[in-house]
């Protein structure tokens, strides 16, 4: 995600992380803030302790990535880790480029 952020930070792409804890100890906002700093996460991260976003997206997997267009329509969902050396990353970049070319 950091690579995507750096690649598109001057475009209209908006990246937002949503931390949905699986275990109670992962709900500690101070621990989450420390991890964001330690991992040098450059985009905003929301804490979804009550799984409201998780349920709204009918999510079932950690991690999940959603591409949402300018109209708010989910256009793609990637389940699992995203690795820059895999086809899924190349496909995701192509989808991002496509969505950035579309008008609102």
Image: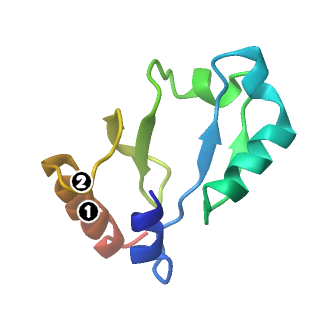
Residue 67 image position (x, y, % from top left): 40, 50
Q: Confirm whether residue 49 shows in the render.
A: no
According to the image, what is the colour scheme of the structure? rainbow
Q: Secondary structure at mark 2?
A: helix
Q: Residue at x 27, y 69 (%)?
A: 97
Q: Classify 35 as above or below 98.
A: above
Q: Secondary structure at mark 1?
A: helix
Residue at the far bottom in the pictured view: 10
Circle 1 Cα neighbour tier, 10 Å, few/some/many (<14 / 14–19 / ≥20): some
Q: Residue at x 37, y 73 (%)?
A: 103
Q: Position of residue 13 (x, y in %)?
A: 47, 68
Residue 86 location (% of width, % of height): 17, 49
Based on the displayed image, in which of its 4 quarters is residue 3 positioned? bottom left
Q: State whether residue 17 is above or below residue 69.
A: above
The residue sitting at 70% across, 47% down in the picture is 35
Q: Is residue 18 left or right of residue 82?
A: right
Q: Is residue 70 left or right of residue 32?
A: left
Query: Residue at point 69% right, 15% down?
Result: 23
Residue matched to label 1:
93
Please report contact status of discs 2 and 1: CB closer than 8 Å, yes or no. Answer: yes
Please name the residue that numbered disc 2 is placed on.
89
Q: How many marks?
A: 2
Mark 2 or mark 1, which is nearer to you? 2
Left or right: 80 in relation to 31: left
Q: State the image coordinates of residue 27 (x, y, percent, origin top left).
A: 78, 27
Q: Observer-nearest residue: 44 or 32?
A: 32
Res 79 seen here:
yes
- Whole-angstrom CA distance, mark 2 to mark 1, is 6 Å
Give the quadrant of the C terminus: bottom left
Q: Residues within 10 Å of mark 2 (few under 14, many from 20)?
A: some
């Amino acid at each position: 995600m950091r690579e995507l952020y750096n690649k598109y930070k001057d475009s209209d792409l908006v990246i937002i992380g949503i931390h949905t804890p699986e275990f109670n100890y992962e709900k500690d906002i101070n621990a989450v803030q420390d991890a964001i700093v330690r991992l040098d996460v450059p985009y905003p991260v929301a804490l979804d302790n009550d799984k409201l976003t998780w349920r709204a997206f009918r999510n079932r997997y950690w991690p999940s990535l959603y591409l949402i267009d300018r109209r708010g329509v989910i256009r793609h969902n990637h389940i699992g880790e995203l690795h820059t050396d895999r086809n899924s990353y190349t496909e995701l970049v192509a989808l991002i480029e496509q969505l950035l070319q579309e008008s609102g």
